[in-house]
Image (spheres, rainbow, N blue to C red):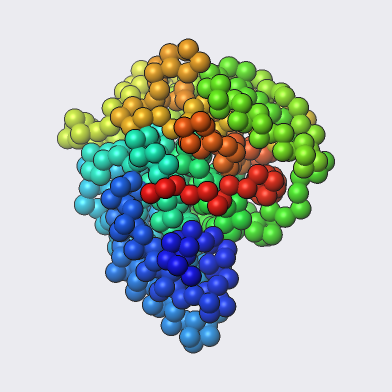
Amino acid sequence: MPNDELCFTSAVDLAAAIRAGKVSPVEVTTAVLARIAQVNPTINAYCTVAAERALDEARRAEAALARGERLGPLHGVPISFKDLTPTAGIRTTFGSKIFEHTVPVEDAIVVERARAAGAVVIGKTNTPEFGCKGVTDNLIFGHTKNPWNTGRIAGGSSGGAAAAVAAGLAPLAEGSDLAGSIRIPASVCGVVGFKPSLGRIPRYPSVNGYTGMSHLGPITRTVRDAALLTSVWTGPDERDPQSLPATGEDFTRAVEGGIKGLRVALSLDLGYAAVDPEVRGIVAAAAKHFAGLGAAVEEAHPGFENPESLFMDLTAPIRAAAMAPYLPKWRDQMDPMLLLRVDHAPKMTAVDSERATHRRTALWQTVRKFFERYDLLLTPTTSVAAFPLGRVYPEQIEGRPLTNGLQWFPFTYPFNLTGQPAITVPCGWTAEGLPVGLQIVGRRYADATVLRAAHAFEAAAPWVQRRPAL
């Protein structure tokens, strides 16, 4: 198989080919590393490539095959981790000058589980400082560029992960998502990004084990690959007090079965958001596939008010508490978008913070009642396709000026507040050839239903053979 074909082969198919002896882990890893060397200087998706270590892991995977050992579901398959996720022995900077030279001594749980499943860790993908915004740049590594148009953003904060997958620089990537940081870059880079239910994939290390809204999840080229990686990562861990009990589900099998009979709501603006007309049209056309697949589709809004200020009130104290020890020395080298949240927190009282939790609860009750009527909600993933590098958000959408970085992804962060599963899948292309994402949101804990719906849509409107011309 030609090297580039290996790089664009799904993880499910690679794992099967490796088990069958049709291709070796060393061959796959070598092909991916060669493509990274060729393409990464253009898009800057990886900030650290652990080439020698990855080749050593691939050789050990190959030796295990030769010995006839029992193999994990990801045996020999390359994977990347976001530069916010600790990897023992591999530099992890958090996109910040503060930790520019940090090398962790402990793996995060998701790294442990990927290694236990046999995956080969290729390296770390770029992120804005502490994942603070929806575009990917920082003072250490600079901008990550969109593989479909290198003059455009790759989204954020998992922008390096999404750009890497879109460009064939490993089939599997890990992302994290506090406000949409898996779904936003996956959408603008034309790949799949899945945010499971809060706690489905345990987080550790983490300083805020009880107040989290951040989810970990896969970024892949196919829904089946996302389901495979989700199956590897799910299950409780005592180090994360929010982690959910095991359900026994095999998410890879759960994608089968279709969506006939499901009740599906379509909201193109949640009742309040500004959305680019081209994006509206592409998502509306994509939603028609669900009716063709046997679902009952109707337009409906969940009914909550814009939670922008609520999100700020809930997350600002988290950011401020984490950054407080570093502000005296590092403030002038910290991202302005991060400082906006840090500086918002001192304006709040303890009572304000508690009131914010009341508002979050009221939001959940509204959404809960909505999902008593519907199994799924369809929305655009972002309000616009990828915009030019150098901006944190567009100047305006639909003639409405934007004033902050949350306003171009109004569809993602509400479902961090509720903790529901949500996935983005490519659903079309703008006249400029930029991908547009469809977000599918499910009931709390209905991760399998979301994956099944995404897989059914992928089969009805396939996109995976389309590749950026890098």
The single residue placed furthest to the bottom in the displayed view is: 67
The location of residue 192, given as percent across then percent down, is: 54, 46
Q: Is residue 420 visible?
A: no
Towards the viewer: 434 or 143: 434
Query: Could you say which quadrant of the image residue 159 lies in?
Result: top left
Instruction: State whether residue 447 is above or below residue 357.
Output: below
Q: Can residue 56 be seen in this view?
A: yes
Instruction: State whether residue 11 is above or below residue 182.
Output: below
Q: Which residue is drawn at 32% across and 52% down?
A: 40
Locate residue 426 relative to residue 286 in the image: left or right. Answer: left
Towards the viewer: 429 or 92: 429
Query: Could you say which quadrant of the image residue 387 lies in?
Result: top left
Q: Residue at x 73, y 38 (%)?
A: 290
Q: Which residue is drawn at 36% across and 18% down?
A: 347
The single residue placed furthest to the left in the displayed view is: 329
Towards the viewer: 325 or 147: 147
Q: Which residue is drawn at 57% across and 63% down?
A: 12
The location of residue 389, given as percent across then percent down, is: 33, 32
Locate residue 346 relative to residue 376 in the image: left or right. Answer: left
The location of residue 386, given as percent across then percent down, is: 43, 32
The location of residue 225, given as percent across then percent down, is: 57, 56
Instruction: State whether residue 133 is above or below residue 465.
Output: above
Q: How many labels does the image show?
A: 0
